[in-house]
Every structure is written in C-alpha cells, then in structure tokens.
Image (spheres, helix red, strand yellow):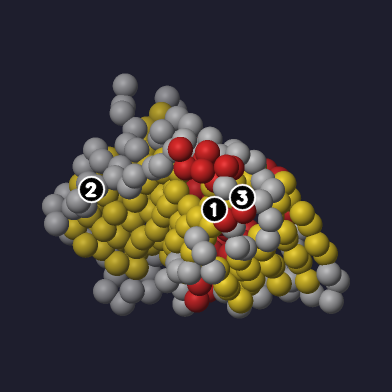
Amino acid sequence: MPEAEEQQASPSKSTGFIARTQSPGQWKAVTAAIQTLVEEATFEVNQDGITFRAMDPSHVALIDLFWPNADFQKFSCEKPDRFTVRMDDFAKLIRRAENKDSVEISRSGAESLNLKLSNGYKREFELHLIESSQSNTPLPKLTYDSKFVTTEPAFDRILNDVSAISNYISIESGKDRVLFSGKGDTGRANVVLEKDDTGKGDLVSLTSEKESKSNYSIEYLLKITKSAGSASDTINFEYSSKMPLRMDFKLGENSNGYIRFYLAPRVQE
C-alpha cells in the first residue's frame, strides 16, 4: 500500500509517457486477460515497456504481463511511471477500436489517462485514474518437471470436451504423450495428445523429466484461454505433480512479450 500512497502524493513527478500500436489486437488481448482476474489494475511503465502483475481475489490465479517497448509503433517514457484503472472502464474503451485503428495511450497529468483511436476517423477519450489498492505480488519460485506446447485451438477444444463431463481437468504427462481427463457424475472424458517429432501436430513439443499429474479448474482455464488466446497461436505449459500450472501466451508471433498465468492446483475432495 505505501506504493499507492506515493503515487497519489507525488503527482508532479510524472513526466508522462506515450505508447502506440498500429492495431488494437495486443491491447484487446491484454485488457481481456487482466479483466478475467481483477477489477482494477496498476500498470508500471518504464523505458523497457509496460508491466503488470496481480492475483485474483481468491488467490487461485496470478497474471504476469511483460509488454516490451519494441512491440510498439511509438514508445517513449522519460521516467518510470505507474497508473491504476478500473478494468471494466479501460477494456470498454479498448473494445471501441476497430481492426485497422492505431491505439495510443499517454499520460501528461496526474489524474487521467488519454486514449486515442485513429484510422481516418479519430476518437479521443480521457479516462479518470483511481487510487491503487493492490499490494506487491511476488512471483512463485518453482521448478517444473514437465513442459509442453500445444496449439491454442487444440487446447480450447480439449477444455470444452472435458467440461462436458467435469468441472476440473487432470493433466498427466509422460515421455511421449499428454493425457487430459476429467470425471463427473455422468462419466469420464479423456483426450490424448501424442508427441509429434515434426512439430506440426497439436502437441508442438513435450519435455518431461518425470511423469507429472495435477488437477486444475476448467472454469479458470476456459476464461484464461478465451481472453489471452487471441494473442498467440500456441500456449506454453509448465507444471509438476500437485503444483501450480504456468501458461505462457506470446504477445504476437515476433514478440518477446508475454501474458503469463499461474494457476493453483485443484484439491480433489
């Protein structure tokens, strides 16, 4: 909380920043992903780019964003800054952007964020900032026994197939395959992705130091994949038995940026 007090107490220290993209795709993926977990968001801006990290109120999921300056058509930040917005309000404005619109956010004062959408038809919005109530969120220090990469459409199909039977999904990986399964009152669902050395199948890659198995909430996974999946063709997974699942979505094919989620394992009753 001291950081939030410093932000509000020292508005004159802000020298402003500008961040512009040629299209709204990344903005929409970022805002949708954050909106699935939190109601307000405090973004950090410095010369390297834009970052954000927070846990959802139930402490089941954590989101970690790194959006590098190289991803932007124009980016400038003379001095580190931070701003806090209500995500519903921010995402509503971002959704106003059409596919060919450039999107620019900037900050020149202490109380508002400026948003410009432009593609011949120019629109400008001013969004009032709020005082942050978020505390620092450290990243979990974990080692992973299994890592695999799937295509985003394949994982979305898997979640929908298993959710027809169960409200959780069990992920079990071995040397050459990953088994996704779930049980419910009406029966059981199983989906198997097998290792394909060509890298052209739904299971793009798989590395497993030892067999791993853990259960996770399908509700969370569906929301995460739906929101962040639009930014990436593939999803990187890392996990160990009965440990949190890490999911990485790239912010575009040629981007070093990512939206990363950590999802706590589900304890079966």
Q: Residue at x 37, y 46 (%)?
A: 262
- Mark 2 neighbour density, 10 Å: few (under 14) some (14–19) many (20 or more): few
Q: Position of residue 109 (x, y in %)?
A: 68, 56
Task: Determine the CA span between mark 2 and mark 3.
Answer: 37 Å
Q: Is residue 6 left or right of residue 85?
A: left
Q: What residue is shown at x 72% (from left), y 60% (from top)?
A: 115
Q: How far across and how far down the image is residue 191, in percent? A: 37, 50
Density class for disc 1 (Cα within 10 Å; few <14, some 14-19, many ≥20) is: many
- Describe the element under mark 2 as helix, strand or loop: loop
Which image quadrant for residue 195?
bottom left
Q: Residue furthest top?
A: 269
Counting residues from the N terminus, which is met first, the one under dot 2 or under dot 1?
Answer: 1
Give the residue pinned by disc 3.
Answer: 11
Q: Tell me which label, 3 or 1, sits earlier in the chain.
A: 3
Is residue 26 something one can see in this rendering? Answer: yes
Which secondary structure, mark 3? helix
Viewer-side label of 3, 1: 3
As drawn, the label of residue 142 is: 2
Which residue carries the number 1 mark? Answer: 82
The image position of residue 177, as x and y in percent, is: 25, 57
Number of marks in the rendered image: 3
Would you call the spot at circle 3 few (<14 residues within 10 Å), some (14-19), or many (20 or more)?
few
Spatial CA span between label 3 and label 1 = 11 Å
Does 104 sit above or below residue 133? below
Q: Mark 3: which amino acid? A: Pro
